[in-house]
C-alpha cells in the first residue's frame, strides 16, 4: 500500500527480517510506523537470493524469530538448513500473522533522507516521488543487499544471458542443455554450482579465491529432536546467545589448538565436527582466528579432505584455499567438492588465466574464448555499507553519510552516527552483525532501538545523537578487537576488499556476548555516549 500519512513517528527502510520486526516492535510500543521496501514482497535477502540451492547456513531452529513464543512453537521447519523458498514462506507468514503488510509500501526505493534541524525530523523521499516526514529513521537495509557486479569489458556484445545470484529471476532459470560459466566461489557460488552442474550441459567454474567449505550434512529434521528444542526453546536460544557468534550453543567451542597435542586427538576433534557438519566446525578450537598455528591445523585438515574427495589432483590442488581459515566466511556446502568429479564440470583458476571480458559467444579467459550460453555472477555484495551509501542521507549542517564514511564507516555501537540524530542502523558496521546468527543480532538491535525510543518519549527528549568522543572511542575499540584477530589477513568483504575502490576497514565487531553487555550498560546509564535534546 502507499504511505497513508505524510508524517509518522518512525520510518523503517527495508522489509526483511530486521525491518519487519522493527515495524512490529515499534508499532506495539505505540509509535506510528511506516516501512518502505524496494522489492515486491517481504523477505529482503530471502526475497532476492532465489538462485538454485539458496539455503541458510545457520540451522533452521536457530535462524528464526524468538520474540513470540507461540510463533516459534507453531512453525515447523522441514530441514536442518532451510531453503530460500521455505524461509520466504516463514517471513511471509510472520508478516500476515502480525498484520504488518498494512504499514508497508512495496516496490518503492528510499532515495534520500534529510535531517531538518529546526524541526528535529527526517524528511524521506522515495523514487515514487513520495515525501514523508518522521522523527526517527531506522535503516533495516541489510548487510548483503547491494550486489557487487564486476564491470567486465564488452558485456553488451554477449548474446547469452547474464545473471547475478542476488538478483535472481523470480520465475527461476532452466539451464538444461546450456553451457554455463559461474564466476565466484563464495557461499552463493558454492551452493548453486552443484545444482547448476546437474542441470547444465557443461559448467565452467571461474575461481579467483578458493573457499573453505564444510559439509552441511543437511537432512530432514527429526521430530523428536524438534520437540526437545521446542520444549526448552528459551534455554536453547539463551545458550546460543552466549557464544561468540550467537549460534551453535549445543556444540561448545573447544580449547586452544596447542592444548590438544597428540595429532590423532586433533584429528578426532576435527573429524567429529566434519561429520556433524556446519559452521560449528570452526569452533573445534577457541583460537581459530587468533592463533596462526591453530588456524593452520584447520586449513591442513580441509585441504586434506579436498584432496580425498576430488579425484583429479590438479583440480584438487586448485580448489585448496591458501588464505587463513575462516578469514573469509566459511562456506557450508552440499556436495560442492564432489561436483568437480563430474565429467561436465571444469575449474579455471583466474589467478593463472585472467578473465578479460565478454565476446559475442562467451567470455575471454587467459586469451582463449570460453563459449557459453549463460554467465552467472556469484560475486557477492558491497557489504554492510553498500545499501546505506546508495541512499543520499544528509544529517546536521548538510553533512552527508557518504562523506562521513568516505574513509570507511564510523559510528557508535554500530547503531548510530555522529551528525545524524535520530537515525539508527540495524546490524550496522561496528556491531557483531555478519559474524553472528543474523536473526539474533537483528532481534537484539530492534529491541534495543525500541527501548531507546520509548525511553526518549518517556523522558521527553526530541533527539538522540552519538557524541563525537563516543564515536571515536568506539571506532578505536572495533579496530583493537579486530587487530587481535587474523581477520585482516585476507581480502574479504568484511574488509570491503571485494569492491574496487572501497576503503579497506574491518567492518563487523567480533564477539556477541561482550557487545550485548556493552549495549545494555549504555542504555542503563541513560544512553551514555549519546547527546540528548
Ligand atoms: P562472497 O562470499 O563475497 O563471494 C563472492 C565470490 O565472487 C568470491 O569468490 C569472490 O572472489 C568472487 N569475485 C568477486 N568479484 C570478482 C571478480 N571481479 N572476478 C572474479 N571473481 C570475483 O559472496 P556470496 O554471495 O557468495 O556470499 C555472501 C554471503 O552470503 C556469504 O558470506 C554468506 O554470509 C551468505 P574473492 O574472494 O573476492 O577473490
Image (cartoon, grey):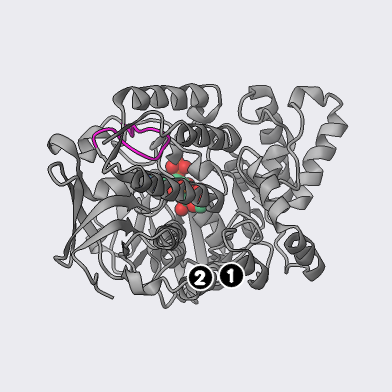
Residue 64 vs residue 371, the one in the foreground: 64
> Can see residue 200?
no
Counting labels gives 2
Quadrant containing the C terminus is: top left
Magenta run includes residue 417: yes
Residue 366 vs residue 247, the one in the foreground: 247
Which residue is drawn at the image coordinates 29% and 57% (left, top)? 11
Examine the rendered structure and indicate whether residue 446 appears above or below residue 162.
above
Marks 2 and 1, the one that precedes in the sequence: 2
Residue 424 vs residue 108, the one in the foreground: 424
Magenta run includes residue 376: no
Specify whether 406 is left or right of 266.
left
- Magenta residues? 408-419
Residue 399 drawn at (x, y percent): 17, 36
Residue 177 drawn at (x, y percent): 49, 76
Examine the rendered structure and indicate whether residue 260 appears above or below residue 140.
above
Specify whether 376 is left or right of 322.
left
Examine the rendered structure and indicate whether residue 413 appears above or below residue 137.
above
Secondary element at tag 2:
helix
Which residue is drawn at the image coordinates 13% and 38% (left, top)? 398
Residue 105 vs residue 253, the one in the foreground: 105
> Can see residue 428?
yes
The numbered dot on residue 448 is none
Q: Which residue is mark 1?
A: 198
Secondary element at tag 1:
helix
Residue 95 drawn at (x, y percent): 46, 71
The crowding category of the residue bearing disc 2, from other C-alpha atoms within 10 Å (few below 14, some 14 to 19, many at least 20), is many
Residue 494 drawn at (x, y percent): 45, 38
Q: Which residue is mark 2?
A: 94
Label 1 residue near ligand 1, CB within 8 Å: no
The crowding category of the residue bearing disc 1, from other C-alpha atoms within 10 Å (few below 14, some 14 to 19, many at least 20), is some
Dominant SS type (magenta): loop
Amino acid at each position: 500500500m502507499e504511505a497513508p500519512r505524510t508524517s509518522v513517528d518512525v520510518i523503517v527502510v527495508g522489509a526483511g527480517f530486521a525491518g519487519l520486526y522493527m515495524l512490529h516492535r515499534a508499532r506495539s510500543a505505540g509509535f506510528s510506523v511506516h516501512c518502505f521496501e524496494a522489492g515486491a514482497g517481504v523477505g529482503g535477502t530471502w526475497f532476492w537470493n532465489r538462485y538454485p540451492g539458496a539455503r541458510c547456513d545457520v540451522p533452521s531452529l536457530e535462524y528464526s524469530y524468538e520474540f513470540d513464543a507461540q510463533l516459534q512453537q507453531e512453525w515447523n521447519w522441514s530441514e536442518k538448513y532451510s531453503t530460500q523458498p521455505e524461509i520466504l514462506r516463514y517471513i511471509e507468514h510472520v508478516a500476515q500473522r502480525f498484520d504488518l503488510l498494512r504499514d508497508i509500501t512495496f516496490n518503492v526505493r528510499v532515495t534520500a533522507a534529510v535531517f531538518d534541524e529546526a524541526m528535529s525530523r527526517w524528511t524521506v523521499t522515495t523514487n515514487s516521488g513520495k515525501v514523508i516526514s518522521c522523527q526517527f529513521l531506522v535503516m533495516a537495509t541489510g548487510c548483503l543487499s547491494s550486489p557487487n557486479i564486476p564491470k567486465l569489458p564488452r558485456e553488451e556484445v554477449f548474446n547469452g544471458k547474464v545473471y547475478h545470484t542476488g538478483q535472481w529471476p523470480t520465475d527461476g532459470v532452466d539451464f538444461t542443455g546450456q553451457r554455463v560459466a559461474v564466476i565466484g566461489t563464495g557461499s552463493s557460488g558454492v551452493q548453486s554450482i552443484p545444482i547448476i552442474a546437474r542441470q547444465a550441459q557443461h559448467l565452467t567454474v571461474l575461481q579467483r579465491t578458493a573457499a573453505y567449505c564444510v559439509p552441511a550434512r543437511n537432512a530432514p529434521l527429526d521430530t523428536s529432536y524438534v520437540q526437545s528444542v521446542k520444549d526448552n526453546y528459551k534455554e536453547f536460544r539463551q545458550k546460543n546467545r552466549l557464544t561468540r557468534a550467537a549460534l551453535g550453543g549445543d556444540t561448545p567451542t573447544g580449547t586452544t589448538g596447542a592444548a590438544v597435542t597428540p595429532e590423532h586427538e586433533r584429528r578426532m576433534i576435527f573429524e567429529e565436527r566434519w561429520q556433524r557438519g556446519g559452521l560449528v566446525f570452526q569452533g573445534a578450537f577457541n583460537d581459530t582466528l587468533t592463533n596462526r598455528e591453530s588456524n593452520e591445523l584447520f586449513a591442513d585438515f580441509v585441504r586434506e579432505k579436498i584432496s580425498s574427495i576430488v579425484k583429479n589432483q590438479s583440480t584438487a590442488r586448485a580448489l585448496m584455499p591458501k588464505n587463513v581459515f575462516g578469514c573469509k566466511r566459511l562456506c557450508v556446502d552440499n556436495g560442492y567438492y564432489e561436483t568437480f568429479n563430474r565429467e561436465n564440470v571444469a575449474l579455471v583458476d583466474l589467478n593463472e588465466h585472467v578473465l578479460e571480458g565478454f565476446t559475442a559467444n562467451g567470455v575471454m579467459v587467459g586469451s582463449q574464448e570460453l563459449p557459453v550460453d549463460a554467465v552467472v555472477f556469484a560475486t557477492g555484495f558491497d557489504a554492510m555499507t553498500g545499501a546505506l551509501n546508495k541512499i543520499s542521507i544528509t544529517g546536521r549542517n548538510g553533512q552527508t553519510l557518504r562523506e562521513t564514511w568516505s574513509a570507511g564507516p564510523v559510528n557508535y555501537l554500530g547503531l548510530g552516527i555522529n551528525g545524524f540524530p535520530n537515525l539508527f542502523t540495524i546490524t550496522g558496521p561496528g556491531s557483531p552483525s555478519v559474524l553472528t546468527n543474523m536473526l539474533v543480532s537483528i532481534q537484539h538491535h530492534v529491541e534495543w532501538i525500541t527501548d531507546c525510543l520509548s525511553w526518549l518519549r518517556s523522558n521527553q527528549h526530541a533527539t538522540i545523537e552519538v557524541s563525537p568522543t563516543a564515536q571515536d572511542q568506539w571506532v578505536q575499540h572495533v579496530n583493537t578487537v579486530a587487530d587481535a584477530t587474523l581477520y585482516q589477513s585476507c581480502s574479504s568483504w568484511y574488509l570491503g576488499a571485494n569492491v574496487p575502490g572501497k576503503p579497506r576497514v574491518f567492518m563487523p565487531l567480533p564477539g556477541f556476548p561482550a557487545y550485548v553487555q556493552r549495549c545494555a550498560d549504555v542504555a542503563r546509564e541513560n544512553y551514555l555516549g549519546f547527546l540528548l535534546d
